[in-house]
């Protein structure tokens, strides 16, 4: 067996240009895994799937934007619980535990936090609307102001 082949491979990682590629690959792999782990079963859906859940499975829409954002327009029949208050108000949704819940937001961070709180408290069917309220508006779906 030729040992020189294995000795040359051990120097592969010691070369600076190769080490940078290996570190970049490891970091990008970790980032991909982190997204899978951090979602913990919370699916992102588009507006088409959200409409199907609302129409055929009587899904509850939970809008987690702040009061001023909610006042500018929201989905009909949506329940408004700002993300900052979800930890103390999630029990208001207890009667909807067996129904799908679609979480609406403006950007991704608030819906993920609210969804994790609901998941932690035993809600099995949590969905985040990709693109949030902006995607809903772009699809020309109904918005109410009241």
Image: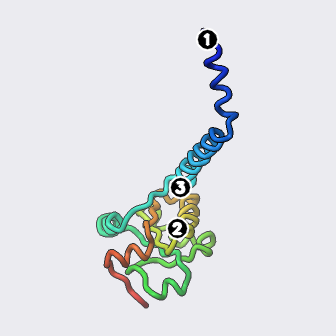
The image shows residue 84 at horizontal and vertical percentages of: 62, 74
**Which of 59/66 is in front?**
66
Residue 6 is drawn in which quadrant?
top right
The image shows residue 85 at horizontal and vertical percentages of: 61, 75
Residue 130 is drawn in which quadrant?
bottom left
Q: Please state which of the two labelled residues, at mark 1 or mark 2, is closer to the viewer.
A: 1
Question: Residue 2 has which mark?
Answer: 1
The image shows residue 5 at horizontal and vertical percentages of: 61, 18
Q: Is 101 left or right of 23, judged from the image as shown?
A: left
Residue 138 is drawn in which quadrant?
bottom left
Question: Residue 39 has which mark?
Answer: 3
Q: Residues within 10 Å of mark 3 (few under 14, many from 20)?
A: some
Q: Residues within 10 Å of mark 1 (few under 14, many from 20)?
A: few
Task: Examine the rendered structure and indicate whether residue 59 appears above or below residue 71.
Answer: above
Question: Residue 108 has which mark?
Answer: 2
Choose the circle earlier in sequence order: 1 or 3.
1
- Distance (Cα) linking label 1 and label 2: 55 Å
Task: Examine the rendered structure and indicate whether residue 14 appears above or below residue 21.
Answer: above
**Which of 93/126 is in front?**
126
- Give the structural element (helix, strand or loop) at label 3: helix
Q: Is 129 left or right of 21, judged from the image as shown?
A: left
Q: Residues within 10 Å of mark 2 (few under 14, many from 20)?
A: some
Q: Please state which of the two labelled residues, at mark 2 or mark 3, is closer to the viewer.
A: 2
Residue shown at 29%/65% (left/top)? 56
- Distance (Cα) linking label 2 and label 3: 11 Å
Q: Quadrant of the C terminus?
A: bottom left
């Amino acid at each position: 067996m030729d040992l020189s082949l294995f000795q040359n491979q051990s120097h592969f990682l010691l070369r600076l240009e190769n080490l940078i590629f290996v570190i970049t690959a490891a970091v990008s792999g970790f980032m991909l895994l982190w997204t899978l782990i951090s979602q913990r079963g919370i699916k992102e859906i588009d507006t088409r799937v959200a409409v199907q859940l609302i129409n055929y499975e009587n899904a509850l829409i939970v809008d987690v934007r702040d009061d001023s954002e909610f006042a500018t327009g929201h989905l009909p029949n949506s329940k408004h619980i700002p993300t900052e208050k979800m930890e103390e108000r999630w029990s208001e949704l207890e009667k909807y535990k067996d129904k799908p819940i679609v979480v609406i937001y403006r950007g991704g961070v608030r819906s993920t936090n609210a969804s994790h709180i609901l998941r932690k408290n035993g809600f099995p069917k949590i969905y985040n609307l990709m693109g949030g309220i902006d995607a809903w508006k772009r699809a020309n779906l109904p918005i109410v102001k009241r």
